[in-house]
Image (tube, helix red, strand yellow):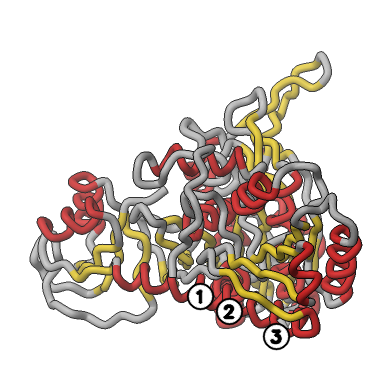
Amino acid sequence: MENKTIKNEAITRREDDFAQWYTDVCLKAELMDYSSVKGFIVYRPYGYAIWEQIQSYLDRRFKETGHENCYMPLVIPESLFNKEKEHVQGFAPETLICTIGGKNKIEDPLIIRPTSETLFCEHFSKIVSSYRDLPKKYNQWCSVVRWEKTTRPFLRGSEFLWQEGHTIHETEVEARNETLAMLEIYDELGKELLATPFIKGKKTDKEKFAGAEETYTIEALMPDGKALQSGTTHYFGQGFSKAFNVTFQSKEGKLEYPHQTSWGVSTRLLGSIIMVHGDDNGLVLPPHLAPIQIVVVPIAQQKPGVIPAARKIYDLLRKEGIRVKIDETDRTPGYKFADWEMKGVPIRLEIGPRDIEKEQVVLSKRNTGEKIIVKNDELIGESKKLLDLIHKEMYEKAHRFLLEHITEVRNMDELKTTVDNGGYAKTMWCGDEVCETKIKELTTATARCMPFNQEPFDNKCVVCGKKATKVVLFAKAY
């Protein structure tokens, strides 16, 4: 069931201008504000609170799997950064470089971190000497800077918040297992917290992370048919270890290089949540993610007994671990309804004089607009059931959309039509980068991933007609 509430005129309709709708929601839902420097945004408390929910979930999962949080410096000496050539080539165009400290020229310019592989490698080279020191499984929560030409709030910023995990292992098998295990945690984040289905798969060599042997990804599909890379994990092999001389003595007494991984998600996930679930009234937040799960709105609050009754319900819900807020401002109920709909709160609880007489409340579902009358003595149980139901409905709706927008294509005309209409073009590919590049040149679509479920549906490459070896999903992307 779709939301039937009245359209909020404060924001653009999605069907009229999807990009403007997105910007309107970012601002009107008070998620962010622009700063005086392009690409550097202010994370307002409500937007940051959503990121904190993601942090909380992932931090718990990381620690359950033996990872430890740390923090690396903000800056990287240029001489250190340049040690891994392929990595440098990938990031050099996006670096912000400090050349003056105080009034003095910095002889070895400092790069504000675009990512921290080099810093971790330098540190690992100092603290690892034996197989007994392995594995090292570190994570840091921080911001990074990449000097982007085109920026959009959350989706592509010159500065963004993220977590970056960095691990080193004694064996290749252990490192590869780590890479896939972290991808699985990201996928579960989508299912359990974000109500967002991801496609999991491996990046092509052309699209993999600079310096990685293999890159794996979770890809989400937006309502406008564009893909959004939502998280990646990388198997580095021994490339960085060799470049930075990270070694350990094996059980056999030999000097060896450890196998390395890295993995990360960012505040780009906030952009995904806005687009995947939002509607013409603003945000629609998944209940397990929402900083406020239920907002209590007193009706005719000036009348005796209404505010005390609303506060009693607020206290009851809060004691049950539900994230709840009460709106006692002197604004009209209509204004409050529109405001909390804009912020995407999953359930609005209304209580007025008539409800007090009947010992009931009215619950309104943000995702559908449906209203449900609940007796006071059933409120806790029904609220928890309803939060779970809303999450399930939101996930299933997004999953249906995803499945409906994956199309098998057997020639370039079909591929172009599919990506132009929006969605994934499921193609057969010979594995030659020339064909991959040609698709991008002709359609602006890129290879999003080679899904783990490799079920061939043809034996010819969609571009050159030669024998196909891989199933690849192509789409236009953010």
Quickly name the residue at label 3: 252
Q: Are marks 2 and 1 in contact (CB under 8 Å)?
A: yes
Q: Nearer the viewer, residue 450 or 421?
A: 421
In the image, which is nearer the foreground, mark 3 or mark 2?
2
The percent coordinates of residue 259 (x first, y second) are 61, 71
Which disc number belongs to residue 389?
A: 2
Q: Label 1 belongs to which residue?
A: 393
Expressed as whole percent of the image width and height from the top left, the position of residue 444 reads 26, 46
Residue at 73%, 39% in the rendered image: 75
Secondary structure category for the residue under label 1: helix
Q: Which residue: 72% across, 72% down?
A: 62
Residue type highlighted by circle 1: Glu
The answer to which image quadrant residue 59 occupies is: bottom right
Q: Earlier in the sequence, mark 3 or mark 2?
A: 3
Image-based side of 348 in relation to 274, left or right: right
Tell which of 263 and 334 is nearer to you. 334
Residue 240's disc number: none
* Mark 3 or 1, nearer chain start: 3
